[in-house]
Image (cartoon, rainbow, N blue to C red):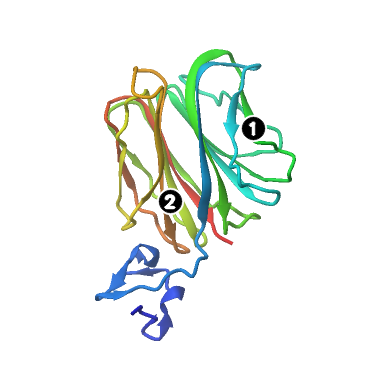
Amino acid sequence: MAIEEISGKAYTAIDALSGVATSAIDNVSGIDAPSSGGVDIVFSDVTYSSFDFRWSTTNPFNVSLPSTASSGDFIMILFSSDAPVGSNMAVTPTGWTLREFIGNNASDNHLIVYTRILNGTEGSTVSIYSTISSNRGGMAWAMVCENIDTTNPFGTNTTVIDSGGRNMTVPTATSASAGTFICYVGFDGADGDPVTMTNNGGFTLTLGGTADVPVGGGGTHVTSAWRYAAIGASTSTGTTDVNFAKSDGKAGMHLMLQRA
């Protein structure tokens, strides 16, 4: 049995109860909340790539695109790299849009978000070049985003940089319209995993991905992770507390995606 309305208003039209998003509530007084009807944003065919070599203007990081993607699909790439510099080292690939960047010398890693609506000419990979030549490491998740507003896919994101310690708090963001928010973080060095996240806005975060590069060793390169939750319109994410296994520089963001 599912609850259909509260005080005469359809449950599916209510964004929050007592300040908690209805998308984060499983039941009310023991009665199951209804499903969203399949309109939530879905990340399908999530494809992982990594690199650990001399990244340069001529030697790119080739990110694998989802094999099921076809013309008209909205693709998002979450790219994390080891980067002890203040500016963005990555050259935005032709035809792609840079949606978010965070990172500097203190974080010693960069987080980048790219998107594109495919037109059938992309091939199976996208090449990301660096503005300088240096030994780097990193990873990327590429995915098809279903049920996203392709005209206005993002709301207002929040970001944070932290130069030390194991803990970091990603600032609150507020949704403009219903959709999904991603907590996306990076850590300077491998072996930062396990990465834990605790959301303080009442949301249960679903694991999207987590990885170390290079796998299982060294104090260089990067650990990254992302988790997500559906969110109603005009709703606060609350802060998200993030903990890494080691102490070092780190960066994070709340990425606000708006559904169709």
**Position in image of residue 162 (x %, y %):** 36, 31
**Residue ID for mark 1:** 126
Q: Would residue 27 be seen by someone viewing this image from the given angle?
A: yes
- Measured along the vertical axis of the image, is residue 120 above or below residue 152? above
- Measured along the vertical axis of the image, is residue 192 above or below residue 113? above
* Amino acid type, label 1: Val
- What residue is drawn where x is 51% and y is 55%? 42
SS of the residue at dot 2? loop
- What is the spatial separation of the Cα atoms under label 2 and label 1, in whole angstroms? 30 Å
**Position in image of residue 25 (x %, y %):** 33, 66
**Residue ID for mark 2:** 173
Residue farthest front in this picture: 67
SS of the residue at dot 1? strand
Q: Nearer the viewer, residue 239 or 124?
A: 124
- What residue is drawn where x is 43% and y is 51%? 173
Q: Would residue 92 be seen by someone viewing this image from the given angle?
A: no
